[in-house]
Amino acid sequence: MRTPLVAGNWKMNGTRASVAALTQGVAAGVAGLEGVEVLVCPPYVYLAEVAAAIGTAPVRLGAQDLYTAAGGAYTGEISAAMLVDSGCAYVIVGHSERRALLGETDGTIARKFMAAQENNLIPILCVGETLDERQADSTLAVIGSQFNAVADAVGIEAFSQAVVAYEPVWAIGTGETASPEQAQEVHAALRAMAAKRSAKIAADLRLLYGGSVKAGNAAELFAMPDIDGGLIGGASLDADEFLAICRAAAV
Ligand code: 13P
């Protein structure tokens, strides 16, 4: 059985004070919540403080990116080992904002995925099509090439310790959500792509949906058979809203 995962991607938001309040709200609210794994991904500079504020609450910590090298002269970069040292269990790789704004390629993303796993971090690999690509009917081709590029590089076995997030670019931060049916179609296709390589790994692979998930639309998305939780942006910055989404995913 796949335990649902709800991950908050806080992106480049917050102050020390707001992050402390948000973490306390989430940590207090998850008490007694079962059947869902809850994860928060703050900006790097707040990781250690968030880890301390989580304490023993059942909230996992993740980062939003990492660098591929183990250490050394890479000004401004952060290694997988540093993330582990700061309390992280997960790391997002290949977010569409990094692909679009920072020029990340499938090759870079595959190397980041490997660097994460070499340090026992669980990568959350993001894939997603733009509006133009959807309108050109190339959604599944785009998703396929993003997924297969990484699967070719790392091997399907690596996905037994990974998560994949489908985030249609046109639904990120726009208030426009993929319908449950649109999302399910892509999730089923992703699972089928993984199953071509290993049926067992595909069956156990958690596939998250991301893109304008809110408390009001989470339940219908999470009810879809191949949607195993969500990667939440804006709505994860409000503890009550985020907790409501977590409850919607709990099985
Ligand atoms: P929003 O939930 O703000 O649309 O962001 C989704 C996302 O990009 C999460 O990684």
Image (cartoon, rainbow, N blue to C red):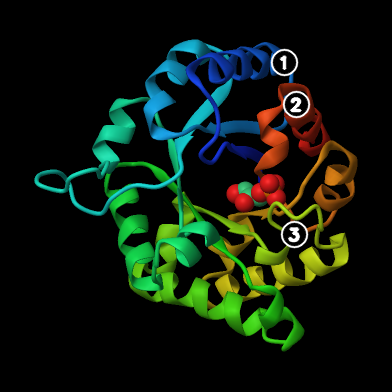
Residue furthest to the left: 73
Give coordinates of residue 222: x percent, y percent. 81, 48
For badge 2, the amino acid type reads Leu
The percent position of residue 196, horizontal first and vertical second, equals 56, 78
Horizontal side of residue 106 vs 216, given as left or right: left
Mark 1 lies on a secondary structure that is helix
Q: Is residue 36 left or right of residue 160?
A: right
Dot 3: within a 10 Å radius of its alpha carbon, few (fewer than 14), some, or many (20 or more) residues? many
Q: Which secondary structure, mark 2?
A: helix
Q: What amino acid is labelled 1 in the image? A: Gly
User: Is tag 3's residue or tag 2's residue first in the polypeptide sequence?
Assistant: 3
In this rendering, the answer to whether 43 lies above or below 194 is above
The image quadrant that residue 52 belongs to is top left
Residue underneath mark 1? 29
Name the kind of residue labelled 3 in the image.
Asp
Residue 108 position within the rendered picture, expressed as x and y whole percent measured from the top left: 33, 66
Q: Residues within 10 Å of mark 1 (few under 14, many from 20)?
A: some
Marks 1 and 2: in contact by CB < 8 Å? yes
Instruction: Say if 13 sits above or below 34 in the image.
Output: below
Foreground label between 3 and 1: 1
| Residue 4 visible | no
Q: Quadrant of residue 38?
A: top right
Looking at the rendered image, the disc whose residue lies closer to the viewer, 3 or 2, is 2
According to the picture, the residue beneath numbered tag 3 turns out to be 226
Indicate left or right for 148 with 29 as reference: left
Gap in Å between the C-alphas at discs 3 and 1?
27 Å
Q: Which residue is mark 2?
A: 243
